[in-house]
Amino acid sequence: MTYLETAAQFYSEVAQTPEIGLCCVQSTPLQLPGLKIPRTMEEMNYGCGTTVHPNELANQPTVLYVGVGGGLEALQFAYFSRRPGAVIAIEPVKAMGEAARRNLETATQLNPWFDTSFVEIRTGDAFNLPIEDSSVDIVAQNCLFNIFEPADLTLALKEAYRVLKPGGRLQMSDPIATRTIPAHLQQNEQLRALCLSGALTYQEYTQLIINAGFGQIEIRARRPYRLLDTQTYNLNENLLLESLDSVAFKVDIPEDGACIFTGKTAIYAGKESFFDDSAGHILQRGIPAGVCDKTAAKLATVKPGEILVTDSTWHYNGGGCC
């Protein structure tokens, strides 16, 4: 049995008998006015973070959600796009798709504004999305891509890139590892299905996103997720997993490399009222400006002592000068 077959069997079982918090550290679902989430959806909240960022959801975007799970985030996306077919959910596991449909039916009873036509559930997988090229505004997935082996993850990322409109966004939440996970854990199919052994390091994860063609990545949250301890997992030292929420944009990769925003800022402290680096970055004296990591590194060497570059906060919500 392959790791994908193991994962499919595992999620088929938990679709029929939900296990609260069985693999992921559950977070409180996003609270929105007039949105009531069915209890079964909360019990099937197997994600490690969130892909639903309200500031990304103006103008009722068309959302492709890969791996519908219990339907929680599909419902949340529908909250912002209240029209038939606004959310297309792709689900390879039959039992999970059926459970999501039941949960969405329940959601209509709790939410007068919601209609099940807002969410269309299609059978398919992340490697061959049943969607036309350049046809959706957002592709989202929560705690699915991390179970893929690198070659399969590359395929999934390229498929997401293919179906996005120019300027579209790939919104993801996945575990990442603070160091490379040992081979004996990577090869454990059950642990991989549990979102515990397939995680890549931050550098590996973001590089694969860039390799798929995405020219800009914004980190929305990075926080501790799970600890793989020495006794349970046969390790020489404890290994911390983190949860990473990111948004990657389908824009061209600049000649000098992709832009990754991690919450760094640059602050000009020179004698003039502003600093212009002639590359599109204007810093007002004394006012922090969000910059990508690449620009931060360059500015730190331009005027030593006159430009302060702050550390990553691992949270970025726009508003920078890049």
Image (tube, rainbow, N blue to C red):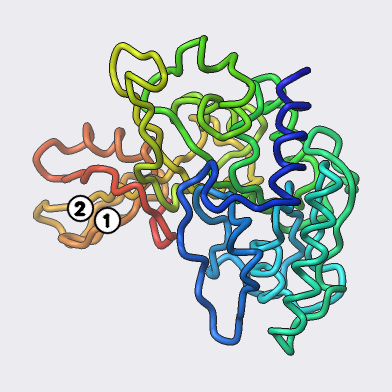
Mark 1 secondary-structure assignment: strand
Depth check, front residue: 250 or 208: 208
Depth check, front residue: 105 or 49: 105
Q: Is residue 281 above or below residue 157?
A: below
* Location of residue 33 (image quadrant): bottom right
Q: Is residue 296 left or right of residue 203?
A: left
Can you tell which mark lies on residue 267? 2
Instruction: Report crowding for label 1: few under 14, some 14 to 19, many 20 or more residues within 10 A (C-alpha).
Output: many
Image quadrant where one finds the N terminus = top right
Residue at image point 77% right, 81% down:
108
Q: Of the two numbered discs 1 and 2 on the same chain, state the one appearing first in sequence.
A: 2
Q: Is residue 145 left or right of residue 227?
A: right
Cα distance between the residues tagged 1 and 2: 7 Å
Q: Is residue 93 left or right of residue 257?
A: right
Q: Which residue is mark 1?
A: 283
Q: Is residue 296 left or right of residue 8?
A: left
Q: Amino acid at mark 1?
A: Leu
Position of residue 119 measured from the top left corner of the image (x, y, whole percent): 81, 67
Q: Is residue 239 above or below residue 13?
A: above
Residue at image point 46% right, 33% down:
176
Can you tell which mark lies on residue 128? none
Q: Hey, which residue is sitting farthest front in the picture?
A: 17
Position of residue 295 measured from the top left corner of the image (x, y, whole percent): 36, 39
* Location of residue 292 (image quadrant): top left
Depth check, front residue: 242 or 39: 39
Position of residue 263 measured from the top left corner of the image (x, y, whole percent): 33, 50
Q: Amino acid at mark 2?
A: Ile
* Location of residue 77 (image quadrant): bottom right
Residue at image point 51% right, 10% down:
184
Mark 2 secondary-structure assignment: strand
Residue at image point 62% right, 74% down:
37
Position of residue 265 measured from the top left corner of the image (x, y, whole percent): 27, 50
